[in-house]
Amino acid sequence: MGPWGLPLLVATLAGCLFPARGCVICDPKVREALNPLEADYLPGHLEANHQKKVMEKIKQAVEDFKDLPIDEDSYMGVVDEATLEKASWSLLKDMKRITDSDAKAFCPNKCGLMLQPLIWCSTCQKQVHACRKSKNCGEREVKVHQMEDMILDCELNWHKISQGLTDYSFYRVWKNNSETLVSRGKEPILTKTMVRPKDAGTYRCELGSIQSSPATIIYFHVTVLPKRIQEEIPSPNTETQDETALGEVAVDLPHITVEPQTPKPE
C-alpha cells in the first residue's frame, strides 16, 4: 500500500470504531489490542515506511474519543465503569472484525500492474489508480509425464478485479531467446495435450493491459518426464495352471475302484 492508502486505512479504522466514544483508552484491554494491530496486522497491509505514521494516527484517534460525549447529557472527560466496559467491548469487537477479515483492499497485487477503481475522498469521484509493482511475477517449475496434458495457469487472484486488462499471450521461448506465439485470448490457461519430449522448455505468459506496459509476466519451465509405466494386472477370472477359477470350490472326492463282475450261472 502506498501513501494514497494511508487516509483510506485510517478512515476505515476510525469509521468502524466510531461507536466507541468515551475514555476507552483507559481500559487495559484496549491498549493491549493496539499492540498486535501494530506488530501483526499493519506489516501485512502497509509498506514499512508508512506503518509508524498510520499507527500514530490510530492511537491519536483512540485518544481523541475521550473528547466525545456518550450522549447529549453526558459530561465530557469522565465515564462510569459500566459505560466504559460497553464502549470498550464495542471498540474491541470492531477491531477484531477488521483484523480477522484480512482485507487488502488497496492495491492487493504483490506484483504486476493492477488498475484499481478508487474513490477520492477529496472529490468523492471514482478514478482508476495504477498499482505499479514489478511486472515480473516469478517463475514456475512444471513437470508432466510424456503423453499427458500440460497445463500452464497464468491467472493471479487480483486479475478478475482489475480494470483495463486485455489478453493472455503464451509464448514458447527458445534457447536463443527468440519467441514463438503459442496462443492468445481471454483464457488464462494454456493446455497442451499428449506432450512429447520436444515440448519441454521455457514458456512465457504475458497479460496485456490498456496501458503501454503489460500487467503480468510469468515464466514456466516445463520438464517432460518419461511415460508412466502401467503394470498389467491379470483379470481375476483368468485361470492359470494349478489354480482354481474364482467362484469354484475344490472338493476332494473318495477314490472308488470298480471291479468287473462275473455273470451268475443260470
Image: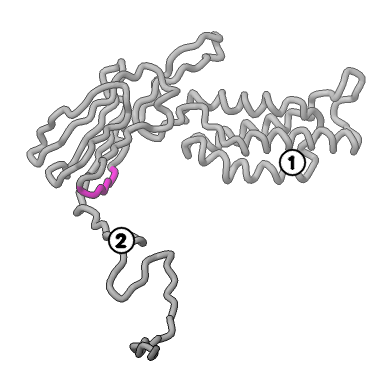
Query: Whole-percent x and y of residue 13?
Result: 64, 29
Q: Residue at x 30, y 61 (%)?
A: 233
The C terminus sits in image quarter: bottom left
**In the rendered view, does 206 fall on the left or right side of 30?**
left
Label 2: how many Cα within 10 Å (few below 14, some 14–19, many 20+):
few
In the rendered structure, does residue 205 fall within the stretch colored magenta? no
**In the rendered view, does 63 fall on the left or right side of 1?**
right
- Nearest the viewer among 92 and 256 is 256
Query: Whole-percent x and y of residue 262?
Result: 35, 90
In the rendered structure, does residue 145 fall within the stretch colored magenta? yes
Q: Residue at x 29, y 69 (%)?
A: 240
Label 1: how many Cα within 10 Å (few below 14, some 14–19, many 20+):
some
Q: Residue at x 64, y 32 (%)?
A: 58
Query: Whole-percent x and y of residue 45?
Result: 51, 36
Q: Is residue 187 above or below residue 51?
A: above
- Nearest the viewer among 190 and 194 is 194
| Residue position marked by numbered label 2 in the rendering | 233
Would you say the magenta stretch is mainly helix, strand or loop?
strand
Q: Which residue occupies the extreme front position in the image?
A: 266
The label on residue 87 is none
Asked which secondary structure carries label 1, the reply is helix
Q: Which residue occupies the extreme left position in the image?
A: 176
| Residue position marked by numbered label 1 in the rendering | 30
State which mark lies toward you, 1 or 2.
2
- Nearest the viewer among 265 and 60 is 265
Identify residue type, mark 2: Ile
Identify residue type, mark 1: Val
Asked which secondary structure carries label 2, the reply is loop
Highlighted range, magenta? 140-146
Query: Whole-percent x and y of residue 106?
Result: 49, 27
Q: Residue at x 77, y 33 (%)?
A: 90
